[in-house]
């Protein structure tokens, strides 16, 4: 493992930068452990950085930055039990292909599959689901390198507290080097996408949630238009989108044209409500079925900044009504739709859905547009509802807030004190959210 000279780094959205003292690409868990011990000898912090899809500074490395690009092995696949062990740097899209080749799948996932498996897990990445929860609930075991350079494994049976804490650990307890996933037999999803008016969606949210395995919707600010998405298992046969329809809808319209729209509204924000009205009216219904991960995920080439909060499920409709009212009171001009997803409760200590059924409200802006006033206004609304911000998405909350909204936050901090008293894995973001 030799050090590299290209030390400058920025995340996917371009809003986080870092220039660590040293960059290295370990090829094995033992080399990760050696890098941690070496950093300790020099008094440097160390972080492993994935693909940079977090909008927060979760991946910022000040001392030593480890790149996981050589830690991509598939260690084992057990089709009888569904247990699959892969190394930390394997991208989700590669994991999805490997699982599919073996007749397996993740039960649920988010709509982006470019992240490394460890990066997605450590920030509690999730999708939307009535019964199937996020990534932290699909893990059977973890392998980590701790601050003293030791290599440990944890599961519900072995070091259960570490397992509960480290599944969404922000890299603050140790460097995740391998993950054992608890997968399910592969399945097809039937996707039903349908435009609806705001009033109908708000009136039927509970109905759609109860009736569908995976339900979400998007509201186009400044309009009455929403796009609903309902995904449910089907026996098949698969009826995927044609190559032309996929290119037209998911690549050309959702990315190329949408990117052009955002470049226009960036220069002329006043026309945003008019443009959104056209976009909402242009939405068409479509139904198709395909391999689950191909339905869960979509290409995303338009760069943006995002904030997302999880609130108690029962607060969703009142929160959405108040959020819409904010648009009437504030001088916001927002081109990106607002995304709403749902998730059952999870038991990982720092999962945003820990201990409660949750609704997620995500707001976005084009990455070249200012976000501060908009995100601050939404954040004030959702924190008043005991909201928990997504660990990988922009927010201004600190340890005092998290102490109030996470029942096991104090336990997490105590475990961190035990495992990393010298804060070998700290960075500015962990200092913000954990208080030291």
Image (cartoon, rainbow, N blue to C red):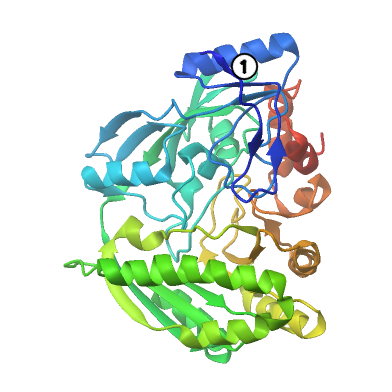
* Res. 336 in view: no
* Res. 384 in view: yes
Q: Is residue 349 left or right of residue 182?
A: right
Q: Residues within 10 Å of mark 1 (few under 14, many from 20)?
A: many
Which residue is identified by label 1? Answer: 36
- In the foreground, 108 or 372: 372
Relative to 419, say whether 400 is above or below.
below
Q: Quadrant of residue 276?
A: bottom right
- In the foreground, 228 or 64: 64
Q: In which quarter of the image is the C terminus?
A: top right
Q: Where is residue 223 in the image (x, y as percent from the top left)?
A: 62, 87
Q: Where is residue 115 in the image (x, y as percent from the top left)?
A: 49, 44
Q: Where is residue 326 in the image (x, y as percent from the top left)?
A: 77, 80
- In the foreground, 129 or 116: 116
For the point 64% across and 80% down, the residue is 221
Provide the secondary structure element on which disc 1 rests. Answer: helix
Most extreme residue toward the top is 41
Q: Quadrant of residue 236?
A: bottom left
Most extreme residue toward the left is 237
- In the foreground, 436 or 110: 110
Q: How many labels does the image show?
A: 1
Relative to 340, say whether 54 is above or below.
above
For the point 46% across and 32% down, the residue is 88
Q: Position of residue 412 (x, y in %)?
A: 68, 37
For the point 69% across and 47% down, the residue is 56
Relative to 282, say whether 72 is above or below.
above
């Amino acid at each position: 493992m030799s050090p590299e000279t290209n030390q400058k780094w920025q995340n996917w959205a371009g809003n986080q930068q870092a220039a660590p003292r040293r960059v290295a690409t370990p090829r094995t868990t033992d080399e990760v452990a050696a890098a941690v011990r070496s950093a300790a000898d020099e008094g440097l912090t160390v972080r492993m950085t994935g693909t940079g899809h977090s909008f927060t500074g979760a991946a910022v490395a000040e001392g030593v930055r480890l790149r996981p690009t050589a830690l991509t092995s598939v260690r084992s696949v057990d089709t009888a039990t569904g247990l699959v062990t892969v190394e930390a740097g394997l991208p989700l899209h590669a994991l999805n292909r490997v699982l599919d080749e073996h007749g397996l799948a993740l039960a649920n996932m988010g709509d982006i599959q470019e992240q490394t498996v460890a990066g997605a897990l450590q920030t509690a990445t999730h999708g939307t689901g009535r019964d199937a929860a996020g990534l932290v609930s699909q893990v059977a075991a973890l392998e980590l390198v701790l601050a003293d350079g030791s290599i440990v494994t944890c599961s519900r049976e072995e070091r259960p507290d570490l397992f509960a804490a480290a599944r969404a650990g922000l890299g603050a307890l140790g460097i995740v080097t391998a993950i054992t996933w608890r997968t399910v037999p592969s399945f097809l999803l039937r996707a039903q996408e349908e435009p609806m008016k705001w009033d109908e969606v708000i009136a039927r949210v509970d109905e759609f949630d109860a009736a569908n395995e995976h339900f979400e919707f998007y509201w186009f600010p400044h309009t009455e238009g929403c796009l609903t998405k309902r995904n449910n298992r089907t026996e098949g046969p698969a009826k995927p989108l044609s190559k032309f329809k996929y290119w037209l809808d998911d690549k050309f319209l959702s990315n190329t044209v949408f990117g052009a729209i955002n470049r226009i509204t960036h220069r002329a924000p006043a026309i945003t409500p008019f443009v959104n009205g056209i976009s909402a009216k242009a939405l068409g219904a479509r139904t198709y079925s395909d391999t689950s991960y191909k339905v869960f995920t979509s290409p995303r080439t338009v760069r943006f900044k995002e904030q997302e909060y999880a609130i108690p499920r029962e607060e969703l409709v009142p929160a959405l009504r108040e959020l819409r009212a904010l648009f009437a009171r504030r001088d916001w001009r927002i081109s990106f739709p607002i995304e709403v997803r749902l998730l059952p409760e999870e038991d990982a200590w720092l999962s945003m859905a820990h201990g409660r059924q949750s609704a997620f409200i995500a707001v976005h802006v084009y990455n070249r547009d200012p976000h501060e006033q908009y995100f601050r206004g939404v954040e004030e609304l959702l924190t008043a509802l005991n909201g928990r911000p997504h660990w990988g998405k922009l927010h201004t909350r600190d340890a005092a807030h998290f102490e109030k909204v996470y029942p096991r936050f104090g336990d997490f901090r105590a475990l961190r004190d035990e495992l990393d008293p010298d804060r070998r894995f700290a960075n500015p973001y962990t200092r913000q959210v954990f208080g030291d």
